[in-house]
Image (cartoon, rainbow, N blue to C red):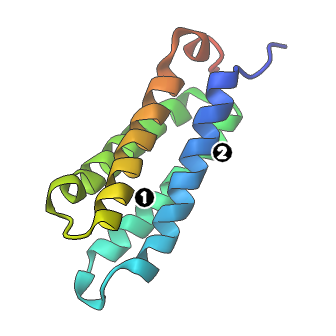
C-alpha cells in the first residue's frame, strides 16, 4: 500500500477551502446576482465531492477536480479586471491562484502515479 503524496494532500486542502468558500459566497453577493448563486453553490458541492474522491486517490476525482478548478478560475477571472474594490480583486486573485495551484498539485507526476 502506497501512501498519499503530500502534493495530493495539499491539493485536497486547497480544493476543500475553495469549495467551502463557494458555499459561503452567496452570503457576500448582492441580491441581484440571480442564478449565478446556484452555479457557485453547485461548484462548491461538486468541489467537495471531488476533494473526497481525491483524498481516496480515485482517478475520476482527478478529472472532476480539473473541471471544477477550471470552472472556478473562469468564474473568478472577471473579478481581476472588473472588481471595483481592492477586496474584490484580492479575492479574485486568491481564487484564480488557489484553483490553479490545485490543478498543478493534482497532476504532478508523483501525484498521478498514486491514483487508482
Identify the residue at the far bottom of this view: 31
The residue positioned 53% from the left and 9% from the top of the image is 109
From the top left corner, tell me how far across and down residue 39 is, in percent: 34, 67
In the rendered view, does 4 fall on the left or right side of 105? right
Q: Residue at x 52, y 25 (%)?
A: 105
Chain-order first, disc 1 or disc 2: 1
Name the one closer to the observer, 31 or 53.
Answer: 31
Q: Are there few (<14), some (14-19), or many (20+) residues within 10 Å of tag 1? A: many
Q: Mark 2 points at which residue?
A: 52
Identify the residue at image location x=35%, y=56%. Answer: 90
Q: Quadrant of the N terminus?
A: top right
Tell me the residue at 80%/13% (across/down): 2
The percent position of residue 91, horizontal first and vertical second, equals: 38, 58
How far is disc 1 from disc 2 in space, using C-alphas? 14 Å
Q: In which quarter of the image is the C terminus?
A: top right
The reply to whether residue 57 is in sight is no
Cβ atoms under marks 1 and 2 closer than 8 Å: no
- State the image coordinates of residue 78 (x, y, percent, origin top left): 19, 56
Question: Where residue 94 appears, x then y in whole percent?
Answer: 41, 49
Q: Residue 54's quadrant in the figure? A: top right
Q: In which quarter of the image is residue 51?
A: top right
Q: Of helix, strand and loop, which one carries label 1?
A: helix
Residue 107: mark: none
The answer to whether residue 10 is visible is yes
Residue 69 against residue 79 in the figure, above or below = above
Amino acid at each position: 500500500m502506497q501512501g498519499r503524496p503530500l502534493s495530493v494532500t495539499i491539493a485536497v486542502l486547497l480544493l476543500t477551502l475553495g469549495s467551502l468558500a463557494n458555499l459561503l459566497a452567496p452570503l457576500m453577493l448582492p441580491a441581484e446576482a440571480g442564478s449565478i448563486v446556484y452555479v457557485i453553490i453547485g461548484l462548491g458541492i461538486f468541489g467537495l465531492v471531488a476533494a473526497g474522491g481525491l483524498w481516496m486517490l480515485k482517478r475520476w476525482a482527478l478529472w472532476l477536480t480539473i473541471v471544477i478548478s477550471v470552472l472556478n478560475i473562469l468564474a473568478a477571472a472577471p473579478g481581476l479586471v472588473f472588481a471595483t474594490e481592492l477586496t474584490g480583486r484580492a479575492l479574485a486573485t486568491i481564487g484564480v491562484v488557489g484553483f490553479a495551484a490545485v490543478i498543478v498539485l493534482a497532476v504532478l507526476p508523483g501525484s498521478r502515479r498514486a491514483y487508482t
